[in-house]
Amino acid sequence: MSAFRALLFRDMKLAFRAGGGATLAAAFFALIATLVPFGVGAEQLLLGRIAGGVLWVSAALAALLSLDRLFQADFEDGSLDVLTLSPLSLELASGAKIIAHWLTTGLPLVLLSPVLGLLLNLPVPGYFPLFVSLLIGTPALSAVGAIGAALTLSIRRGGLILALIVLPLLTPTLIFGAGAVMGALDGTGQGAFLFLAAFSIAAVALSPFAAAASVRLNIAG
Amino acid sequence: MAVVSLVEVQDLGCERGGRRIFRNLTFAVASGQTLSLEGPNGAGKTSVLRILSGLLPQLEGDVRVHMSAGYVVSDAEERGRLAGWIGHHDGVKGQLSVIENAQFFAALYGARMSVPSVLDRVGLSRIADLPSQYLSAGQRRRLGLARLILSDRPLWLLDEPLSSLDAAGRRLTAELIGEHCDDGGIAIVATHETLGLDATRHFLGTA
């Protein structure tokens, strides 16, 4: 388990050092959310109505931003060979990398979301559902994204292909995430939360295996 | 450290990008021996080492690792857990300091040795706090040697370990390999240069 912890802490350290994606994703998230009122106009009712959806789409794009280097950086500098030959299985290694990615990009987005909700005039009953839906749903972004990152790790400019692979797979997260906020505003119940949680749990549980299999394929290629 | 008594390679064949690299490669290395794999560029030295480590699947043939406990390891992934590895890249993170890199390797491989003493051994203790992005190619290689020591594996697979190293670094590498083999380890080294130690040589031709 100490190997798992070592990899988790190393990846988190790297995310906060120069060239890491931690602060970048949060800044990107804030920027998109700030730009939206310029695009759709400053009508407060409309903004409040779309705030949940806008923040969810922004969160998905921001999470994607730092995903392309998740395995690629390790592949290029030989770390992935070192990891593969270590006592830690690639499944656990992928799990550690997914958790590190969520802690350094997903969690900051969750914490930042109420502030951006204020910026978009989100109605008061929407704050708690927004916060909770992002907390439940952003792990799925990191987990599903990791599969795409592992598939494209040996491709130069793989980030574009990564987005093409991953974004369609994130559709359920976006539907149920934004739906959870909308449901709370409209008072139509909390069904979306349950679907979001189910999708998130399934993604987090299964993706380390898919990512590890993709890493093996790429290393052997 | 689990102890390997013999590594046996039989009729190994390899193809890369649809092109045949080598076939019918057969050799055996016993505990305490060093094998130096030699051959022109493109002869497949790196591929042999990657197959032995389990990183690359073999097209044909067998690799059998006989353990001194009496059983034989033929599974590629299990073989990887016996391998100490030096490849073209050293797996060093530029954003981390030398000692942070070494501590990560130690934790990852569950090393029981003290990290500072290993850094001292490879001549990096004076720059332990330097961010690794400022290391020269030779110093990176020394950090790779530190990882090799920390991994504490019986079967060393070294791909051009002498590249970018200065005279002292080459002597150190030869010394480390010598000590490893004296302890009953095995070293298989792909190289273009003389290692400066007692080694069986095996030539790979172009297929």
Image: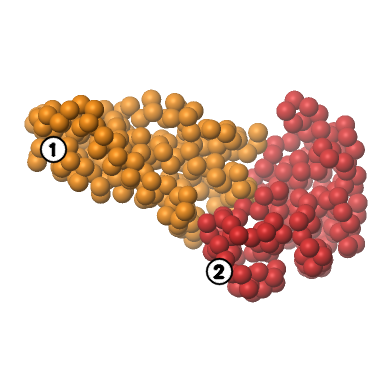
Chain colours: A orange, B red
Q: Quadrant of the N terminus of chain B?
A: bottom right
Residue A53 to residue A92: above or below: above
Residue B146 - label: none
Q: Is residue A195 left or right of residue A128?
A: right
The x and y percentages for residue B189 are: 81, 53
Q: Residue at x 9, y 41 (%)?
A: A124
Q: Report the residue marked by disc 1.
A: A121
Q: Residue at x 49, y 28 (%)?
A: A161
Residue B124 to residue B48: above or below: below
Badge 2 amino acid: Asp
The x and y percentages for residue B17 are: 72, 28
Question: Real-space Cα distance between discs 1 and 2?
Answer: 48 Å
Q: Report the residue marked by disc 2.
A: B129
The x and y percentages for residue A102 are: 37, 46
Q: Is residue B203 left or right of residue A164?
A: right
Badge 1 amino acid: Asn
Residue B190 to residue A59: above or below: below
Q: Residues within 10 Å of mark 1 (few under 14, many from 20)?
A: some
| Secondary-structure class at tag 1 | loop
Q: Residue at x 60, y 73 (%)?
A: B116
| Secondary-structure class at tag 2 | loop
Q: Residue at x 88, y 43 (%)?
A: B39
